[in-house]
Image (cartoon, rainbow, N blue to C red):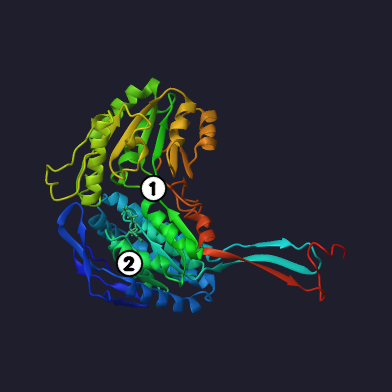
Amino acid sequence: MSTSAVSRIHKNFINGDWVEARQGRTFENRNPADTSELVGIFPSSTHEDVNAAVEAAKAAFVKWRLMPAPRRAEILYRAAEILVKRKEDMARDMTREMGKPLSETRGDVQEAIDMTYYMAGEGRRLFGQTVPSELPNKFAMSVRDPLGVVGMITPWNFPMAIPSWKIMPALICGNTVVIKPAEDTPLSTYNLVQILIESGLPRGVVNIVNGMGPDAGAPLITHPDVSAVSFTGSTETGRIVNQACAPSFKPCHLEMGGKNIIIVMDDANLELAVEGAVWGGFGTSGQRCTAASRVAVHAKVHKEFLDRFAARVKSLKIGDGLDPGTDVGPVINETQLETVMKYVEIGKNEGAKIVAGGHRAESGGLSSGWFHEPTIFSGVDPRMRIAQEEIFGPVVAVISFSSFDESIEIANNVKYGLSASIYTRNANQAFRAMRDLQTGIVYVNAPTIGAEIQLPFGGTKGTGNGHREAGTAAIDFYSEWKTLYIDYSDRLQRAQIDAEL
Ligand code: ADP
């Protein structure tokens, strides 16, 4: 059931029922391309709603963990099939609440489809190990146990993909879920969970509690019956989540900011590098944690690259993501627009030069949305704030360098470590970059965005805390190892002591 083009009153989903927030409060979900359009009204929840959702998830865990994983997988397969059928409606809903162009929201839904199929496949794997025992007549192996109730807190930039990265691996491992979606994009989580329900998910296995971070997210993290937490969002909030989990040693998966770089060497295919920088820097209006907010260019090709890059960026069409001609949509909300404008001022004051954009975009019917021109700074010193801090908007800092070693030093000298890319035709340089870039993801001859769901996703330093999303790495977070020893010798055998047969 799509909600396209209709604004609706939505509810929380607790124990298989759609219910209002206990205190009856709500918030509005508005279209960032035109804030006069109300996309929907959602409940503004508090700890009371969280408690009810966790209680439901805890009760549902008793049976769900015992359902054979291949049976759980069948529900996921069905969900993936429905997602395929509804892809277009889901994408349109997402563009209305989030703003990115339809081609990108289709990609977001596709990522949820890919992840759902992939994790359904895991239902017949969930590999453990069997290893030889050091003692005779003894069997040794490891299996994966679910954790229990997992609390999830998600951001607005990938409104369906990120919830699917968390929900699908959690479910296939046998966990139950309470999710608090981003307050800017609750509709896409609603759409995803609606499909899981239609696919036969038992009541209580996934629960949605909508609302603001401090009111609805914070009590989820600290709830004693929540066994693990998965968070994607800003580094500041990630620190709060991490600290809230620490006293009870609660496993916590953090996916946070980035200050990703594209390195363009003097032997690069410049046309390709320009296209990569346009897509990496301004796709999703720069609001991806993997966005290329820095482009470092070898001095020998700096001028040529910058001229071509600026010309391409000036030709990008800003507008409503539902319009097929749009290249760059709005930013998500007023606060984000103010942040972008603040950083443009900071960049100017630091002495960097604007070579494209630089202003809020209001003319041509854009004044009722949160639009900003795609903006390029040149002459950026790598120590400037615009080259160090995550802006999360359509602003790219171009830095000049004169040697490979210098480019790697610039790349690594930030507090984040998510994604990096190098454009070069020199295989030796490419391999050295793959070895020396201190990021969780490295691309060669491709921009910093474009992760596929079958490999680990995540970063080092201020980006993450060692866990990874996607691929089998996600299974590692959403399950706990249990090691099993079965002795069929009918006598006491002491490991490390009884060596002879
Ligand atoms: P952004 O600034 O990009 O919106 P946030 O980190 O603030 O990023 O938001 C990511 C998610 O974290 C959202 O779902 C938000 O509601 C939630 N959140 C924000 N503050 C808190 C908090 N104190 N405790 C738990 N969740 C929070």
User: In the image, which disc is placed on residue 257?
Assistant: 1
Position of residue 71 in the picture relative to residue 494 (left or right): left
Distance from Cα at disc 1 to Cα at disc 2: 22 Å
Q: Quadrant of ligand 1?
A: bottom left
Residue 312 in the image, given as x and y percentages of width and height? 27, 32
Label 2 CB less than 8 angstroms from ligand 1: yes
Instruction: Check if mark 1's residue and mark 2's residue have beta carbons within 8 Å.
Output: no
Q: Which residue is mark 2?
A: 216
Residue occupying image coordinates x 35% and y 59%:
160
Q: Is residue 392 above or below residue 146?
A: above
Indicate the amino acid at tag 1: Gly
Indicate the amino acid at tag 2: Ala
Residue occupying image coordinates x 37% and y 47%:
289
Q: Is residue 444 above or below residue 81?
A: above
Nearer to me, 236 or 315: 236
Residue 198 in the image, given as x and y percentages of width and height? 36, 73
Q: Which quarter of the picture shows residue 15? A: bottom left
Q: Can the viewer see residue 86 in this picture?
A: no
Q: Which quarter of the picture shows residue 431? A: top right
Q: Is residue 93 above or below residue 149?
A: above
Position of residue 236 in the picture relative to residue 127 (left or right): left
- Please, what secondary structure does the residue beneath circle 2 have? helix
Instruction: Classify 10 Å Cα crowding around label 1: few (below 14), some (14-19), many (20 and above).
Output: many
- Please, what secondary structure does the residue beneath circle 1 have? loop
Instruction: Classify 10 Å Cα crowding around label 2: few (below 14), some (14-19), many (20 and above).
Output: many
Counting the numbered discs, the total is 2
Nearer to me, 112 or 336: 336
Nearer to me, 269 or 494: 494
Residue 334 in the image, given as x and y percentages of width and height? 21, 51
Residue occupying image coordinates x 26% and y 58%:
184
For marks 1 and 2, the one nearer the N-term is 2
Of the 4 image quadrants, the one containing the C terminus is bottom right
